Image: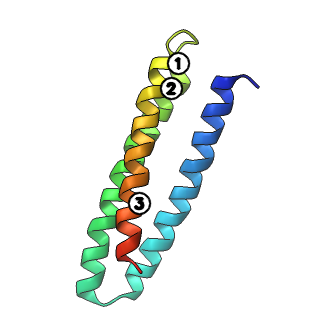
């Protein structure tokens, strides 16, 4: 497996983990009271938006040529970093 394919697989794995974690947070939010649920839903919506952006970057990366993948990787890294930051902020409010 070349470096590009390994990078893409790692991002896919991370995306799958975040999908599962977002769904777990959504389940916890559904169990909370109405006011808390609304606040958590806002966090979940932000996480989903970041996840969608990361997914879009991953799709672009997969479609990129070998020559362009380095530039595309930088964009994907940036999207993943934003998702990680959003995740840390949102998950801290669920505790």
The answer to whether 52 appears left or right of 12 in the picture is left
Percent position (x, y) of residue 59? Answer: 49, 31
Q: Badge 3 is on which residue?
A: 87
Instruction: Quote the CA–CA distance across marks 2 and 1.
Output: 6 Å
Q: Badge 2 is on which residue?
A: 61
* Secondary structure type for disc 1: helix
Q: Residues within 10 Å of mark 2 (few under 14, many from 20)?
A: many
Residue at 45 percent of width and 43 percent of height? 80
Instruction: Quote the CA–CA distance across marks 3 and 2.
Output: 22 Å
Residue at 36 percent of width and 49 percent of height? 50
Q: Residues within 10 Å of mark 1 (few under 14, many from 20)?
A: some
Percent position (x, y) of residue 42? Answer: 26, 67
Could you say which quadrant of the image residue 17 lies in? bottom right
Quadrant where the C terminus lies? Answer: bottom left
Q: Earlier in the sequence, mark 2 or mark 1?
A: 2
Q: Residue furthest right?
A: 1
31, 7: nearer the viewer: 7
The answer to whether 75 appears left or right of 67 in the picture is left
Q: Is residue 6 above or below residue 55?
A: above
Q: Residue furthest bottom?
A: 33
Q: Earlier in the sequence, mark 3 or mark 2?
A: 2
Instruction: Quote the CA–CA distance across marks 1 and 3.
Output: 26 Å
Residue at 50 percent of width and 34 percent of height? 58
Q: Badge 1 is on which residue?
A: 69
* Secondary structure type for disc 2: helix
Q: Residue furthest top?
A: 67
- Do the numbered discs 2 and 1 sit on residues whose CB atoms are within 8 Å? yes
Which label number is shown at residue 41? none
């Amino acid at each position: 497996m070349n470096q590009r394919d390994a990078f893409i697989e790692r991002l896919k794995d991370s995306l799958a983990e975040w999908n599962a974690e977002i769904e777990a947070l959504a389940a916890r939010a559904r169990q909370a009271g109405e006011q808390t649920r609304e606040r958590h839903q806002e966090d979940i919506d932000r996480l989903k938006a970041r996840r969608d952006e990361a997914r879009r970057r991953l799709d672009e990366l997969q479609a990129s040529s070998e020559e362009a993948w380095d530039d595309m990787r930088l964009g994907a890294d940036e999207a993943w970093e934003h998702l990680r930051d959003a995740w840390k902020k949102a998950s801290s409010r669920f505790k």
